Amino acid sequence: MPRLFTGIEIPAEIALALSGFRGGLPGARWVEPENYHITLRFIGDIDERMADDVTSILGERRQRAPLTLTIDGLDSFGGSKPRAVFARTSGNGELNELQAEQERLLRQVGLPPETRKFTPHITLARLKQVSPVDVAHYIATHGQFPKLTFAADRFVLYSSRASVGGGPYVIEAAYPLS
């Protein structure tokens, strides 16, 4: 049974720049730069027949222009119990539209709706029992940097192994944005 999700790949030069933020936060489990991505829609563990339906329906989306995405700082999820440090993206109108379209398509093949609000981001580290004060200090000292902008000319269907932290991720199908 594959564990699937859709996402935007991060170009190597952007991943290299983001990898410079690794370290300096005790207790963080840093994501490997080759596994950086922006998740559009987590699909989960599904059977092969549903995986075929997902692959097919994603090919039926409307044509779109490539997306220009900007990474403009660091943030965290979890508030008083931080669970991740991420690079945030801005100017996400077209990205939000792409995600919403995928949500509609995937519901057509019988997948349940995503319950979490879409927050485009690139996870840099996963946290477990890390002090919120340490996270706030890390973001305050590392979170301001020149904007990183890149063009995404496709989205992909990834598979991952069922484990803590996911990766390594495998591209199962690619869908051009052009």
Image: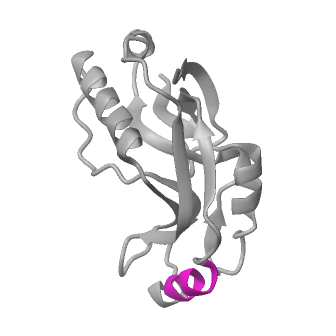
- Left or right: 42 as drawn, with respect to 139: left
Considering the whole magenta stretch, tell me its main secondary structure: helix
Up-down relation of residue 57 to residue 136 (above or below)? above
Closest to the observer, 93 or 131: 93
Residue 116 at least partly seen: yes
Q: Is residue 140 magenta?
A: yes
Up-down relation of residue 81 to residue 90 (above or below)? below
Q: Residue at x 22, y 35 (%)?
A: 113
Q: Residue at x 64, y 29 (%)?
A: 170
Q: Is residue 103 magenta?
A: no
Q: Position of residue 155 (x, y in %)?
A: 53, 29
Q: Residue at x 59, y 21 (%)?
A: 172
- Left or right: 131 as drawn, with respect to 109: right
- Left or right: 152 as drawn, with respect to 81: right
Closest to the observer, 40 or 69: 69
Residue range in magenta is: 135-142
Q: Position of residue 89 (x, y in %)?
A: 49, 57
Q: Position of residue 87 (x, y in %)?
A: 55, 62
Colour scheme of the rendered structure: one colour
